[in-house]
Image: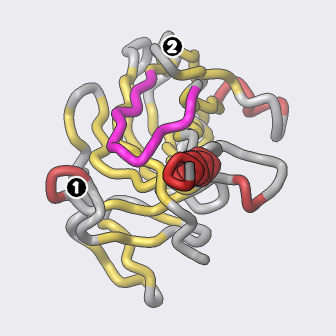
């Protein structure tokens, strides 16, 4: 009976640890270069929707894409699609889903970003620059309490530890009318800042 109780409590603890670890990527076509209107695509296991907050005039240029279920402790492929109506640059902001209570905003390790099936430069996050004591992968930006894990990614890659308030970001070029498929790997982790 004690073994059953221990296993049950372990399962409940693990489930609650990862309960809010839902991958999310916000996409913005609002950059210094101009505005790119974005249309959500159909993505299995993901919802891609226009953002309903922020300035009304930029809402057609901003999307939120998020998994319909949490990920666990195993690396999981995250994949969604959108289509730009004009050519230009869009800004990807990879993190986790929002929760009213900040402590419930689950943490994820993320790595291996690709666009339309092609890894972006430094997709394995191995090349980094020390920016005021924080290791940031070259070609990316990070904010909040993100952390770099040199050996934490899949297949020997590095990873960034992110949540809703602490994101890994990247700008990509898009072409008018051509669907864009975003893929990256993610897994649930404990809050690294505890």
Marks 1 and 2, how far apart at CA: 26 Å
Reading the image, the residue beneath label 1 is 124
Residue 191 highlighted magenta (yes or no): no
Q: Nearer the viewer, residue 104 or 184?
A: 104
Residue that numbered label 2 is attached to: 41
Q: Residue at x 66, y 59 (%)?
A: 165
Is residue 156 something that shows in the picture? yes
Of residues 117 and 67, the one drawn nearer to the viewer in this rendering: 67
- Let me know if residue 18 appears in the view: no
Residue range corresponding to the magenta coloring: 69-80
Q: Position of residue 89 (x, y in %)?
A: 45, 39
- Which mark, by number, is residue 155? none
Q: Earlier in the sequence, mark 1 or mark 2?
A: 2
- In the displayed structure, 3 sits above or below 118; it is below
- Report the side of 55 relative to 70 (left or right): right
Tell me the quadrant of the picture where the C terminus can be found.
bottom right
Residue that appears at 21% across and 66% down? 126
């Amino acid at each position: 009976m004690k073994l059953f109780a221990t296993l049950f409590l372990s399962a409940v603890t693990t489930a609650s640890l990862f309960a809010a670890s839902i991958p999310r990527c916000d996409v913005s076509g609002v950059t210094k270069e101009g505005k790119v209107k974005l249309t959500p695509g159909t993505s299995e296991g993901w919802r891609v929707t226009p953002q309903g907050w922020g300035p009304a005039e930029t809402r057609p240029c901003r999307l939120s894409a998020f998994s319909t279920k949490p990920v666990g402790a195993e690396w999981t492929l995250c994949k969604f699609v959108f289509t730009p109506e004009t050519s230009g640059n869009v800004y990807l902001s990879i993190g986790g889903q929002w929760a009213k209570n900040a402590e419930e905003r689950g943490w994820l390790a993320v790595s291996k970003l690709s666009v339309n099936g092609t890894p972006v430069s430094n997709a394995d996050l191995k090349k980094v620059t020390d920016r005021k004591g924080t290791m940031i992968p070259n070609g990316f930006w990070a904010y909040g309490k993100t952390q770099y894990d040199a050996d934490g990614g899949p297949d020997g890659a590095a990873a960034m530890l992110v949540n809703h308030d602490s994101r890994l970001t990247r700008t990509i070029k898009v072409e008018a009318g051509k669907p864009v498929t975003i893929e990256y790997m993610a897994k649930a982790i404990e809050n690294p800042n505890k």
